[in-house]
Image (cartoon, rainbow, N blue to C red):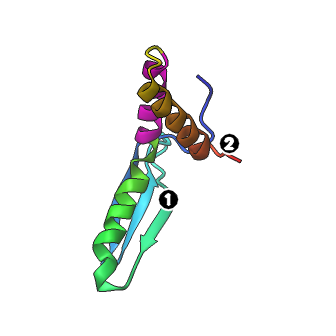
C-alpha cells in the first residue's frame, strides 16, 4: 500500500473555546501537536453542528482506512450491490486522496 499524502491518524477533536474545536495530530514522536483544522461558530444554534463537524473531520483517517479495507473485501464478491459499493468506495478514496477530477 502506498504512503498516504495526508497527516496520518489518529486525529483528535479537542474543544478549544466555547465556540470552536481544534482537530489535532499528536503523533510526531517529539511531543509536538500539529493543528490541522479548527471549526468555529459563534451562533448558538450551530454550536453542536460545529462539534459534530470536528468529530467527523477527526475521524477522516480511520474512515479512509475502513473504505480501503471494504474496497478490498468487496472486490472478491462482485455482485451488483457489491459493484456499486466498490465504485462508491473508489470514488471516496480518490476524493480523500486528492485524485478525483
Q: Split into 4 quadrants, where in the image is the N terminus?
A: top right
Q: Position of residue 88 (x, y in %)?
A: 51, 38
Q: Residue furthest right?
A: 101
Name the residue carrying label 2: 99
First in sequence: mark 2 or mark 1? 1
Q: How many marks?
A: 2
- Residue 50: image tag: none
Residue 99: horizontal and vertical position, in percent?
68, 42
Residue toward you, 54 or 83: 83
Label 1: element kind: strand
| Distance (Cα) linking label 2 and label 1 | 24 Å
Q: Name the residue under label 1.
A: 35
SS assignment at label 2: loop
Queried whether the magenta region covers residue 3, the answer comes back as no
Residue stretch rendered in magenta on the structure: 62-75
Q: In this view, does 62 lie above or below 48?
A: above
Residue at point 46% right, 25% down?
Answer: 80
Q: Is residue 4 above or below residue 35?
A: above
Residue pictured at 33% horizontal, 78% vertical:
46
Q: Which residue is drawn at 41% across and 33% down?
A: 66
Amino acid at each position: 500500500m502506498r504512503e498516504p499524502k495526508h497527516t496520518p491518524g489518529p486525529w483528535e477533536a479537542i474543544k478549544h473555546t466555547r465556540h470552536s474545536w481544534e482537530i489535532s495530530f499528536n503523533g510526531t514522536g517529539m511531543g509536538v501537536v500539529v493543528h490541522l483544522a479548527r471549526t468555529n461558530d459563534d451562533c448558538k444554534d450551530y454550536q453542536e453542528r460545529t462539534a459534530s463537524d470536528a468529530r467527523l473531520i477527526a475521524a477522516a483517517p480511520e474512515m479512509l482506512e475502513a473504505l480501503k479495507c471494504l474496497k478490498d473485501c468487496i472486490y472478491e464478491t462482485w455482485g451488483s450491490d457489491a459493484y456499486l459499493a466498490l465504485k462508491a468506495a473508489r470514488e471516496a478514496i480518490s476524493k480523500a486522496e486528492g485524485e478525483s477530477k
